[in-house]
Image (cartoon, rainbow, N blue to C red):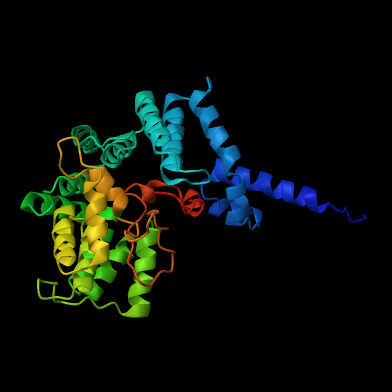
Amino acid sequence: MPKTLIPNGCKQQAALIAALLLIALHGNGTAWTKEAGTNISSAQACQASEQEISRLKWEVNGMQSSKAAAANAAWLLGLIHLHGAGTRPDLPQAFDWFTRSLDLGGQAWAHAGLAWCHLEACKGEADHEAAAKHIAALRHTHAARADYLDWLLKTRQGLGSLAGSEQLLQRAARAGDIQAQVELGLRAVSDNKPSQAAQHFRQASPLSPSAQTNIRILQQQSVKIQGRYPDARSPAEDIYRAARANHRGDGRPRNYTEAIRLYRLASSKGNLAARKMLELIYSRPGAAGGVDIGWMSQLAHINPVQIAPALAEPPAPGDANRLQRDPSPLFDLLPSHWQKCVRSEAP
């Protein structure tokens, strides 16, 4: 039988169709590709993400879909828009999809999405009271993640150092919560306990890209954290670096109160970047006249000495200068294929 030649353009189209089927029918497609003997690259699959997003929207709105299937599709669309997986990040849209998922019923994880959105001000303003209500509802079905989000909420409220808050984090980790394991790993690094840190990261690594990266950093760099915390006698640059670590949550929970104290100390010793950061922090006060937590969060990754500060790019996957968290406490709930399609501007 003569050999049939297929034009290159048709081959590319066929590959995209195969990638779309891979996403729509088989999640990350591992089992399917083994059965079919086909190796579809992540890049090809991501090219098909727009079609898959359209399919998910159709499933949410389709008359033939069950409520449970529609709720699951809306939940996934919320995760996709929250992280910018195969599309641009859109926090208000993510909030709307999480709300739709909850309204449709059948997807309890939607409470986690809405809790995080209320913490991150997806609709323009943080609402800790609303976040707490969704965390309480989530506790009925996903107690470990609820404990972690509750700990995160209390940290944002400045209550993270209380014994009850610490118990939430430890309990979440004991129950196997991925994000709690990453957090405890970062703490262990901060306490100069790399072996303990690696253990936490290994437990989180099957579902957490940041845990995988942190393991590589520990292995390659033999991370050593200086035991002495900077004080008033320390060089201004050391104090400024400690302020940035508290501001961004590098190797520790974010602590805005401590960050501001250290920025002030560094500024008093002549550090220009610290002075500029303080000016930026207080340039947009909160409604009650104090620090705007949402604005403070946005400032965590800028260069304050630039004339027109721009948000810094997130660290590259192999950046050995900085340990990482996942882009959000919901990232491990995003299917692995979609994780690979997250664009660099994702939150």
What residue sits 60% from the left and 38% below the top?
Answer: 51
What residue sits 40% from the left and 36% below the top?
Answer: 94
Is residue 259 at all visible to an observer of this figure? yes
Q: Nearer the viewer, residue 153 or 112?
A: 153
239 relative to 171, above or below:
below
Is residue 185 at all visible to an observer of this figure? no
In the orientation shown, which residue stands out farthest toward the right?
A: 2
Q: Is residue 56 left or right of residue 98?
A: right
Please identify the quarter of the rendering in which residue 258 is found: bottom left
Please identify the quarter of the rendering in which residue 218 is found: bottom left
Q: Nearer the viewer, residue 274 or 133?
A: 274
Residue 153: x and y in percent read: 19, 44
Q: Nearer the viewer, residue 68 or 272?
A: 272
In the orientation shown, which residue stands out farthest toward the top?
A: 63
Q: Count of labels shown?
A: 0
Please identify the quarter of the rendering in which residue 270 is found: bottom left
Which quarter of the rendered picture does the N terminus lie within?
A: bottom right
What residue sits 18% from the left and 58% below the top?
Answer: 259
Residue 285: x and y in percent read: 21, 42
Residue 2: x and y in percent read: 93, 55
Q: Is residue 45 left or right of residue 259?
A: right
Q: Is residue 261 left or right of residue 50?
A: left
Q: Nearer the viewer, residue 187 or 91?
A: 91
